[in-house]
Image: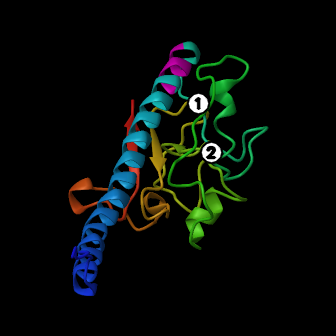
Amino acid sequence: MKTRHSFTLIELLIVVAIIAILAAIAVPNFLEAQTRSKVSRAWSDMREIAGGVTAYAVDHNHLPLDGDDADVPGSIPYDQKAWFPRLTTPIAYMTSVPNDPFHTIKHPPDMMTDILFPGDPLFPYAYLTEGGFYPNPMRPSQPVHAGRPSKYGITSLGPNRIFDSARELGIDDIYDSSNGTVSVGDLVRYGP
């Protein structure tokens, strides 16, 4: 007489436990890889924007103004969505401005992030020039560029999705990949 061999309940539980352990190892690594790919994309996008800013500066003999220059006609105060038309129209230094991969969902409440990025996502990268168009009585040490800024920074919110570089009191939180992908801080590219 032939006997049928089947799996016992213990054997099935062992297989399920092994699969659960492998999934517990694989899922965090997958999420880590997603964050690393967004960081790489952000660096690549910022390099592309820097190329457009450099091309603009060659043609106009100064850098494009940022969204903080509220006193300039046609500018919206502190709106980081307002700077990129200078690079795309009427001359296309860039065909389109990429969106920050870390700023595609509603961000946590934070005063500077809300001021610089009003409204709903999607948002481009933050482009900020050094100094203001006119003197700022609230920040007397801030240089005045009078429409001819000489330095700029392009910023991504980074994995924590908060605009850390805009904090006052000299605090500039720069993302450091050696702290892991959950590190706080922004990805920043300075130029020229």
> Do the residues under discs 2 and 1 have CB atoms within 8 angstroms?
no
Query: What residue is drawn where x is 53% and y is 28%?
Result: 63
Outermost residue on the bottom side: it is 10
In the image, is 155 to the left or to the right of 28? right
Identity of the amino acid at label 1? Pro
Place of residue 126 in the rendered image (x, y in percent of width and height, measured from the top left): 54, 47
Query: What residue is drawn where x is 39% and y is 53%?
Result: 34
Q: Nearer the viewer, residue 143 or 53?
A: 53
Earlier-in-chain disc, 2 versus 1:
1
In which quadrant of the rendered view does residue 94 lie?
Answer: top right
Q: Which of 33 and 155 is in front in this view?
A: 33
Specify whether residue 183 is in view. Answer: no
Number of residues whose C-alpha sits closer than 10 Å to that of mark 1, classed few (under 14), some (14–19) or many (20 or more): many
Place of residue 191 in the rendered image (x, y in percent of width and height, measured from the top left): 39, 33
Outermost residue on the top side: it is 59
Which quarter of the figure is the C terminus placed in?
Answer: top left
Place of residue 144 in the rendered image (x, y in percent of width and height, measured from the top left): 54, 42
Number of residues whose C-alpha sits closer than 10 Å to that of mark 2, classed few (under 14), some (14–19) or many (20 or more): some
Identity of the amino acid at label 2? Tyr
For residue 64, which numbered disc appears in the image? 1
For residue 134, which numbered disc appears in the image? 2
Place of residue 61 in the rendered image (x, y in percent of width and height, measured from the top left): 53, 18
Give the residues drawn in magenta, as a range: 53-58
Q: What element carries label 1?
A: loop
Name above or below for residue 173 compared with residue 145.
below
